[in-house]
Image: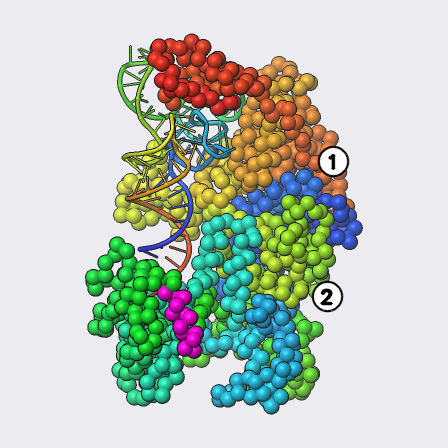
RNA sequence: GCCGGUGUGGCGGAACUGGCAGACGCAGCGGAUUCAAAAUCCGCCGCCCCCUAAAGGCUUGCAGGUUCGAUUCCUGUCACCGGCACCA
C-alpha cells in the first residue's frame, strides 16, 4: 500500500478526503485483477467447478443490463445496480452462493442511427461505449462476476439467440395440451391420421394426396415463428418502417417524409397462443401489483361471442366478435374495418365513393385516428341479416373499427355503445333500446352502457330473452347461436402477435433462406452463428418497396443451400437461395440473457442444463425441502428462476412480457426447468433533477439561472423570477449529472450511499448535489471514529460501552432487516445514528476512553460493507481481517459472515409510555417493559400531571396498549 | 375519457398491523475551538400566538366520516406523476 496523497495540511495525512477515498477505492479495485490475468473481480463458480460450495443455497440477483450509449452511464443506472450490489453482498455474508452478472444489450436502433449520422460503424461505436460503461461500473466497485460478461452482439451469444428463434420456428402450439411441441409431431400426426387439410384455392385435401409444398404451407401456418402479413408504417424516403409514434400527420417525425400504411410480410411470433398462460402465471410471481396489472391489461382478455351474419348477394357470411351477444336485437347495422376483405369485394362491384373512403382511411395513421375521434365512414352498399330480428341491416365501413382486433367487423348496437351511438347519429342510422338499466333511463340522447335486463328482445321465430339479466341473456344467446350453427363462445385478446422483423442493419440476422419459389428453409443449428456481414454502407435504401440494408450485401444474400447450412434433406445443396435480409429487433437479445449468465461460456449449448437448474430452480421456503430439485414441481418449487430482478418500470410490459414468452416456449420444449423467468421483480424509481420554469411554464436551462437568495431563483439574463421544479434530466435543461464527476468529488462509496439514502428505492426522487455532503460527512465521521487521522492506525476504545454495545446490536438487526426489505435509506440512517452516538468529542485527551472497541468496529465494518465496500474493506483490513481469493483477489470482508444481533439486546427493561387525555399527551411514564395493563393504568392515574389534567372529572374509560401508550377518556 | 400511483417542515425523506408525527440528512441559527478561517465538536431548528418563557392553539393536499385514538381505514374532492386510449 502506498502512502495516501493528502489534499491540505501535513498534520492529518489520513483524513478521509475525496482524494483519499478515490485513492483507497482505486487501490482496492486494482487488487481485484485476477492473478491469471484472465479477468477481474469476484468469481462465483458453478456446480462442478473448482471452489464451488454445494452446502450454500443459491441466490440469483439480476440487473436489467444496460444499452451502452456513447454518453456513458447515467446516474439512473447505478441506482438499481447499487441496490442489487448491497443485496448480493449481504446474501453472500448470509451464506448464499450469489450469481450477480452483468452484460450489454448492444444491438438496436440508437447505435445504428448514431452510426448513420457519424459514418462510424455501429460495431466500433458500440464496443467503445461498452468499454466506457465497463470502466464506469467497475469504478463503482460492484460485485459482478465479470467472468460471465457478454454482449448481445457477440456471435457466441447471438448464435444462440438465432438457435432459440429456430426452436420457435420448428414448433407449434398444441391447443389441447396448451403448450408448444416440435412441429415434427404435428407433421407425424397429420400423416398418421391422413388428415384433411385446406389447400391453396380453398379446396380440402387428404395429407397423403398433398404436394410437398401444400404440406409445407399447411405446417407453416402453425409455426410459433411464422411469416405473416401486417400493416406497417412504411416511409419510402427513409427506407424503413416507422413506429406509430414516429408518424405525425401521415409524415415521418424526422424529415417530414410521406409515410404509407402498407401490408408487409414479416416474421411474427405467435405470442397470442400463450395469452392465457401469460395471464394465469402472473399469479405465480412476486411482482409489483402495478406491473401485473399493466401486463394483464396489455393482454386484454375479453370473453364474448363470435357471430356469423348472413350477407346478401352471394357474399360470404360476416363474422363479428362481441362481448355483448345479449344486445343482438339492438344491432341495427354492421361496420367493418376499411382493410376488411368485404370492402375490397364491395369496391370491385363498382363503388367509387367507397373506394375513395377506403383509400383515405387506410393511409390514416393510428396517431391521426386518435387525434380526431370524429366518426367517419361509408356505406358499402351491402346488407346483412340480423339473425335474431330477421331485419335487413346495412353494412358500413368506418375506421373506428380496427382490422387488428377481433375479426375486424362488429355488429353495431347504437343504443348501448357510445361509439356506435355517435356513428348512428352522424349517419342517421336506427337506434333501438334492448337493455334496461336500473336507474339509468334510456332517452335516446346518449347510449346507455352497462348491465341490466333485456327488453325488446323477443322473436317467436328465433329467440326471446326479454326480462333476462345481462349475464343470463348472454348465455341464452350464445346457446342459441351454437344451436343455429351461426356463432359460439369466444375469448378474444387485445394482445397481437409479435412483429419480429426490422428493416435494419444492426440486429441479429434470421437463420433462414428462400428458394426461387419463395419457400423458406431454416439454417441448421450446426451452421450457426449466421454472422452479420460487415457492410460499409448500412444506411437505409430509399425505395417504394422495403429494401433492408442487408440486401446490399449481394454476395452474402445470394448463396447456395449448402453454403448457407441448410440441411441437405430439406433442400439440395447446390440450390441457389437468398438469405432473409430483415433482422431481429432490439428485444431479441434481452429475451434470454438471464439464462446465458448461468453458463455464459458454454460453447455447446445455449445454457448448460446443470447450471440452469442450479441457478433457476429452487424449492419454496415453505415447502420444507432443500437442495436442488431434480425437476420443476408446482407444489414445492418457485415458478420463477431469478430470485430478484431489478430494473426500470419502462420495461414492465414489453421486455418482461417478451422474455416470459420465450421462457415458456423453452420450458415447453424442455430446455429450461421453470415456467417463469423472474420470480421477483422490482422497479427502481426514476432519478429526476431540479429544473427551472418561467411564469409561462416554459423551461430555462439550469446554467441560465442564478440563486439570489435561499430558495429564490431568477433567470440571469432577464432577472425574471423562475420557479424551481422537478423534471427529468435532459441535455437541453443542462441538469444531467455525470457519475464520473461525482466520484471524483466524493468517491464511489459516497456516491453509492447518496443514491441509496435519497429515499425509497421504488420512488422517483430528485438529485440534489447539495445533499451528497451529508453521507460524505457520515463516512468521514466513521473514519475518524476508527482511524487516527495522523497515523492511519486503528483508534479504538479500550473497553466497550454498554449503551453503545446495545445500540450496535440494534443497528445490526435493523440494517439486516432493512436490506431484506430493500429499505436502504433507513438502514443508512440507522448506521449514521450509531456513528453519531459513538463519536468522541473533539480533542478528547485519551481517545481510547471513547468510541468503539476493535471488535465493535469490525462488526460495524461488516454491516457497512454492502453499502460502502471499499471503505469497509479498508477498515476490515486495518482491523486484521485479510485474505486472498482463489483468483488472487485481495479481500477483507468478502468471506465474513453477517454479524449476529443478540435478541436479548433488542429489548429494554423499562419503556417510556405517553399518557393521553382525550387523545392529547399530558404526561410521560417510565414503566417496566413487562408491566401488565392494569398496573400501567394504576401508574398512569396516579401520575401528578395526569391528576392535574383530569381536574376531578370522572374517568369514563382508560385504554392501555402495553408498551405503546395510555389514553384516558373523561 | 379509463386504470394505477403519490401528496408529511424551507428541501430530500422517517413512522411496526390504527397507538408519542417530523427519525436521519441538507439548508439555517447559536456556541466551543482558532490570531483568524476552514475543518471539527456541542446545541437549537414544523407553524401560530407571545418582548421572552411557560401555557395554549394548529398541523401529514382539501372537506367530511368511523374510532378512546387516523399520516395509516372509509366517502367525496383537488393537484401532480405514470400507463392505456374508438379493443366492440
Which region of the structure is painted magenta?
Answer: A473-487
Q: Secondary structure at mark 2?
A: loop
Q: Quick check: is A474 in the magenta stretch?
A: yes
Depicted A348 relative to depicted A414: above or below: below
| Residue matched to label 2 | A604
Gap between marks 1 and 2 measured at Cα? 39 Å
The residue sitting at the front extreme is A460
Residue A96 seen: yes
Q: Nearer the viewer, mark 1 or mark 2?
A: 2
Q: Position of residue A516 (x, y in %)?
A: 57, 87
Position of residue A213 relative to residue A177, above or below, is below
Q: Position of residue A710 (x, y in %)?
A: 36, 32
Q: Chain of mark 1?
A: A
Numbered circle sitting on residue A882: 1
Q: Nearer the viewer, residue A930 or A246?
A: A930
Residue in the picture at 58% in, 79% down: A219
Residue A141 x %, y %: 62, 44
Query: Which mark sits nearer the N-terminus, 1 or 2?
Result: 2
Q: Is residue A357 left or right of residue A938?
A: left
Crowding around mark 2 (Cα neighbors within 10 Å: few <14, some 14 to 19, many 20+) is: few
The answer for which chain carries disc 2 is A
Amino acid at each position: 500500500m502506498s502512502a495516501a496523497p493528502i489534499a491540505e495540511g501535513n498534520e492529518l495525512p489520513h483524513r478521509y478526503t475525496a482524494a483519499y477515498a478515490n485513492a483507497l477505492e482505486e487501490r482496492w479495485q486494482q487488487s481485484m485483477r485476477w492473478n491469471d490475468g484472465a479477468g477481474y473481480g469476484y468469481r462465483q463458480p458453478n456446480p462442478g467447478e473448482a471452489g464451488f460450495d454445494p452446502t450454500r443455497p443459491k441466490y440469483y440477483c439480476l440487473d436489467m443490463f444496460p444499452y451502452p450509449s456513447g454518453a456513458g452511464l447515467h446516474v439512473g443506472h447505478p441506482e438499481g445496480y447499487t441496490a442489487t450490489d448491497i443485496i448480493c453482498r449481504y446474501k453472500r455474508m448470509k451464506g448464499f452462493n450469489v450469481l450477480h452478472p452483468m452484460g450489454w444489450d448492444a444491438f438496436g436502433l440508437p447505435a445504428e442511427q448514431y452510426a448513420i449520422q457519424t459514418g462510424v460503424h455501429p460495431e466500433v461505436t458500440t464496443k467503445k461505449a461498452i468499454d466506457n460503461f465497463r470502466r464506469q461500473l467497475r469504478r463503482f466497485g460492484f460485485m459482478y462476476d465479470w467472468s460471465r460478461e457478454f454482449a448481445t452482439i457477440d456471435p457466441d451469444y447471438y448464435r444462440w439467440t438465432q438457435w432459440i428463434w429456430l426452436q420457435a420456428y420448428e414448433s407449434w402450439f398444441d391447443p389441447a395440451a396448451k403448450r408448444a411441441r416440435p412441429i415434427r409431431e404435428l407433421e407425424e400426426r397429420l400423416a398418421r391420421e391422413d388428415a384433411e387439410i385446406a389447400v391453396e384455392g380453398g379446396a380440402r385435401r387428404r395429407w397423403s394426396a398433398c404436394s410437398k409444398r401444400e404440406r409445407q404451407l399447411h405446417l407453416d401456418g402453425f409455426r410459433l415463428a411464422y411469416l405473416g402479413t401486417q400493416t406497417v408504417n412504411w416511409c419510402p424516403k427513409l427506407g424503413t418502417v416507422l413506429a406509430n409514434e414516429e408518424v405525425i400527420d401521415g409524415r415521418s417525425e424526422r424529415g417530414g417524409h410521406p409515410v404509407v400504411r402498407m401490408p408487409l410480410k414479416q416474421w411474427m411470433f405467435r405470442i397470442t397462443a400463450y395469452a392465457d398462460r401469460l395471464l394465469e402465471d402472473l399469479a405465480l410471481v412476486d411482482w409489483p401489483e402495478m406491473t401485473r396489472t399493466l401486463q394483464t391489461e396489455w393482454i386484454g382478455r375479453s370473453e364474448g361471442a363470435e357471430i356469423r351474419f348472413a350477407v346478401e348477394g352471394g357474399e360470404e357470411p360476416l363474422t363479428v366478435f362481441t362481448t355483448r351477444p345479449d344486445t343482438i336485437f339492438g344491432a341495427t347495422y354492421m361496420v367493418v374495418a376499411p382493410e376488411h376483405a368485404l370492402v375490397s369485394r364491395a369496391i370491385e362491384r363498382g363503388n367509387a365513393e367507397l373506394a375513395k373512403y377506403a383509400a383515405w382511411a387506410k393511409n390514416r395513421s393510428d396517431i391521426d385516428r386518435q387525434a380526431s375521434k370524429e366518426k367517419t365512414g361509408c356505406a358499402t352498399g351491402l346488407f346483412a341479416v340480423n339473425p335474431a330480428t330477421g331485419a335487413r341491416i346495412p353494412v358500413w365501413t368506418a375506421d373506428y373499427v380496427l382490422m387488428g382486433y377481433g375479426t375486424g367487423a362488429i355488429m353495431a348496437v347504437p343504443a348501448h355503445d357510445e361509439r356506435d351511438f355517435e356513428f348512428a347519429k352522424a349517419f342517421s342510422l336506427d337506434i333501438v333500446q334492448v337493455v334496461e338499466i336500473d336507474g339509468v333511463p334510456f332517452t335516446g340522447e346518449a347510449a346507455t352502457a352497462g348491465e341490466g335486463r333485456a327488453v325488446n328482445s323477443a322473436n317467436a321465430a328465433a329467440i326471446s330473452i326479454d326480462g333476462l339479466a345481462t349475464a343470463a341473456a348472454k348465455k341464452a344467446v350464445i346457446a342459441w347461436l351454437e344451436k343455429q350453427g351461426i356463432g359460439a363462445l369466444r375469448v378474444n385478446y387485445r394482445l397481437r402477435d409479435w412483429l419480429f422483423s426490422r428493416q435494419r442493419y444492426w440486429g441479429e440476422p434470421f437463420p433462414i433462406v428462400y428458394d426461387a419459389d419463395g419457400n423458406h428453409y431454416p439454417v441448421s443449428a450446426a451452421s450457426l452463428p449466421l454472422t452479420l456481414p460487415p457492410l460499409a454502407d448500412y444506411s437505409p435504401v430509399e425505395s417504394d418497396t422495403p429494401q433492408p440494408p442487408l440486401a446490399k450485401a449481394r454476395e452474402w444474400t445470394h448463396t447456395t443451400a449448402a453454403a448457407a447450412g441448410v440441411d441437405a434433406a430439406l433442400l439440395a445443396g447446390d440450390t441457389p437461395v437468398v438469405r432473409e435480409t430483415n433482422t431481429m429487433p432490439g428485444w431479441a437479445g434481452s429475451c434470454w440473457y438471464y439464462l446465458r449468465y448461468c453458463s455464459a461460456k458454454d460453447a455447446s449449448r445455449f445454457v448448460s442444463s446443470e447450471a440452469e437448474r442450479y441457478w433457476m430452480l429452487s424449492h419454496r421456503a415453505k415447502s420444507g425441502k432443500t437442495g436442488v430439485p431434480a425437476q420443476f414441481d408446482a407444489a414445492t418449487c418457485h415458478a420463477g428462476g431469478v430470485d430478484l430482478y431489478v430494473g426500470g418500470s419502462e420495461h414492465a410490459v414489453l421486455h418482461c412480457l417478451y422474455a416470459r414468452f420465450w421462457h415458456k416456449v423453452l420450458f415447453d420444449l424442455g430446455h429450461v426447468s421453470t415456467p417463469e423467468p423472474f420470480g421477483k421483480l422490482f422497479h427502481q424509481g426514476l432519478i429526476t433533477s431540479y429544473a427551472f420554469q418561467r411564469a409561462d411554464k416554459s423551461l430555462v436551462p439550469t446554467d441560465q439561472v442564478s440563486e439570489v437568495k435561499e430558495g429564490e431563483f431568477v433567470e440571469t439574463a432577464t432577472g425574471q423570477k423562475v420557479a424551481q421544479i422537478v423534471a427529468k434530466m435532459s441535455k437541453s435543461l443542462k441538469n444531467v449529472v455525470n457519475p464520473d464527476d461525482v466520484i471524483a468529488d466524493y468517491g464511489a462509496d459516497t456516491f453509492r450511499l447518496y443514491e441509496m439514502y435519497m429515499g425509497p428505492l421504488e420512488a422517483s426522487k430528485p438529485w440534489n448535489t447539495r445533499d451528497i455532503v451529508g453521507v460524505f460527512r457520515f463516512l468521514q465521521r466513521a473514519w475518524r471514529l476508527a482511524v487516527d487521522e495522523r497515523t492511519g492506525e486503528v483508534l479504538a476504545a479500550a473497553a466497550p460501552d454498554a449503551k453503545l454495545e446495545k445500540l450496535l446490536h440494534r443497528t445490526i438487526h435493523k440494517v439486516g432487516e432493512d436490506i431484506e426489505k430493500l429499505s436502504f435509506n433507513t438502514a443508512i440512517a440507522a448506521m449514521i445514528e450509531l456513528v453519531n452516538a459513538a463519536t468522541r468529542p473533539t480533542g478528547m485527551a485519551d481517545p481510547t476512553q471513547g468510541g468503539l472497541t476493535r471488535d465493535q468496529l469490525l462488526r460495524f465494518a461488516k454491516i457497512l460493507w454492502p453499502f460502502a465496500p471499499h471503505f469497509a474493506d479498508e477498515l476490515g483490513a486495518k482491523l486484521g481481517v485479510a485474505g486472498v481469493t482463489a483468483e488472487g483477489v485481495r479481500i477483507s470482508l468478502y468471506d465474513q459472515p453477517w454479524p449476529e444481533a443478540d435478541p436479548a439486546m433488542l429489548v429494554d427493561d423499562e419503556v417510556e409510555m405517553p399518557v393521553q387525555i382525550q387523545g392529547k399527551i399530558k404526561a410521560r411514564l417510565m414503566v417496566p417493559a413487562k408491566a401488565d395493563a392494569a398496573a400501567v393504568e394504576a401508574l398512569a392515574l396516579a401520575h401528578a400531571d395526569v391528576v392535574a389534567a383530569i381536574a376531578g372529572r370522572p374517568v369514563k374509560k382508560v385504554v392501555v396498549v402495553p408498551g405503546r401508550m395510555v389514553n384516558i377518556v373523561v
